[in-house]
Image (cartoon, coloured by chain):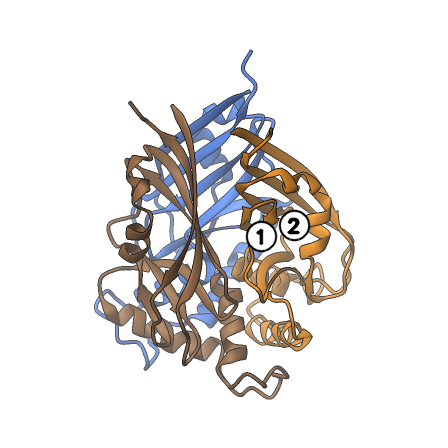
Chain colours: A orange, B brown, C blue
Amino acid sequence: MTMAWLQRQIELAPRRRGFHLVTDEIARAVPEMARVRVGVAHLFIQHTSASLCVNENADPDVRGDLERHFNVIAPENQPHYQHTVEGPDDMPAHIKAALIGTSLTLPITDGRFNLGTWQGVYLCEHRNRAGARRVIVTIQGDSNDG
Amino acid sequence: MTMAWLQRQIELAPRRRGFHLVTDEIARAVPEMARVRVGVAHLFIQHTSASLCVNENADPDVRGDLERHFNVIAPENQPHYQHTVEGPDDMPAHIKAALIGTSLTLPITDGRFNLGTWQGVYLCEHRNRAGARRVIVTIQGDSNDG
Amino acid sequence: MTMAWLQRQIELAPRRRGFHLVTDEIARAVPEMARVRVGVAHLFIQHTSASLCVNENADPDVRGDLERHFNVIAPENQPHYQHTVEGPDDMPAHIKAALIGTSLTLPITDGRFNLGTWQGVYLCEHRNRAGARRVIVTIQGDSNDG
């Protein structure tokens, strides 16, 4: 057994406001994961107006409904918002990030994220116009070398 | 010091819709945890309509109130839902899973989950009728052998 | 490479109900983190009426708006609450803890939490009157000694 650590800063391509599947984009950025027999991958998005979660990878309507319903839970232009200088989509973005979370830990088994059949990793983009999003990926595991 | 990794797929018995204490059921499935002096346990549910969290282990009314209030936060039959083919409880289940989360990391100390006095691990079952739920448990730690 | 584990129970000073930046208070409690080249820190709050998240470290209005908006999402005195014996702020506190989460994993790089420029760690205090809050910090990493 060899104990392996890998940490890498990656950039997820810019996306429009909404919920987006990024499982493959993340996996491609850490090809060394293929050597990890058993381990965990920690994903941490270095922003406060976007978030990461795991949800359904099949019907795109789920992603649309999530965007629509999170806009009900955290609507724009509420009278109790005092942080308004960065635009009407900014404070709701902070609330959504607090609700959904900025990091994710996934199990790794035999070189791959060990997700359920219907699961995928989502980048949840809460701003109307955002650039690439930085994610710190930290992988640790037991790699059977040789 | 010996660095230990343990990863196991377990199944939580089917439960009715609601919030359920499963701390002991999970601990019993990984008896090897008893040998871990310091470490962490990662629990990952391989589904998108159930979730995991830590909350109160005492008054069952807390679990009832959580079920009732999450039904207010993510109600059924909203006009903006387009993902309706799997029944009225399905899209709310995806929203609740995004809000609560599909994974949990717990500290391990002296062979046990190091929870607060009033804390327990919840399986949050968001579907009306669900089967057993698969959870990947990954334990890593420093085990003082010999 | 040396594999290091550090686990410590720390106490966060009592704070009034609301969202509070505690990044420095936590980092000061684990000065050994300075020796970790690559790793992760796991923070686990041993309570069910307070929570931990990462959000904006700059404008304090963001923290005020989060407090105000979470009071909209999980209001006091709802007719469907049956857990009322511990006061009107208690059941909303449990709901907020389920929404925000009781644990947090942060990447460590070159001896520090590797947060984005605008990110900080929040203690989210959901009770009107609370004492110090216990947090179990577990750090693991690759420390380049000598």
Q: Amino acid at mark 2?
A: His
Vertical relation: C76 (above or below) A125:
below
C-alpha gap between disc 1 and disc 2? 8 Å
Identify residue for label 2.
Answer: A47
Which quadrant would the N terminus of chain C be assigned to in this image? Answer: top right
SS of the residue at dot 1? loop
Q: Say whether residue A9 is left or right of residue C19.
A: right
Write the residue at 37% across / 76% down.
B17
The mark total stands at 2
Q: Position of residue B32 (x, y in %)?
A: 32, 41
Identify residue for label 1.
Answer: A102
Q: Amino acid at mark 1?
A: Thr
Chain to which the residue tagged by mark 2 belongs: A
SS of the residue at dot 2? loop
Vertical relation: B51 (above or below) B140:
below
Write the residue at 47% across / 65% down.
C70
Residue C13, visible in the rendered structure: no
Residue count near mark 1 (Cα–Cα under 10 Å), binned few <14, some 14–19, many ≥20: many
Q: Which mark is residue C138?
A: none
Q: Position of residue B49 (x, y in %)?
A: 49, 71
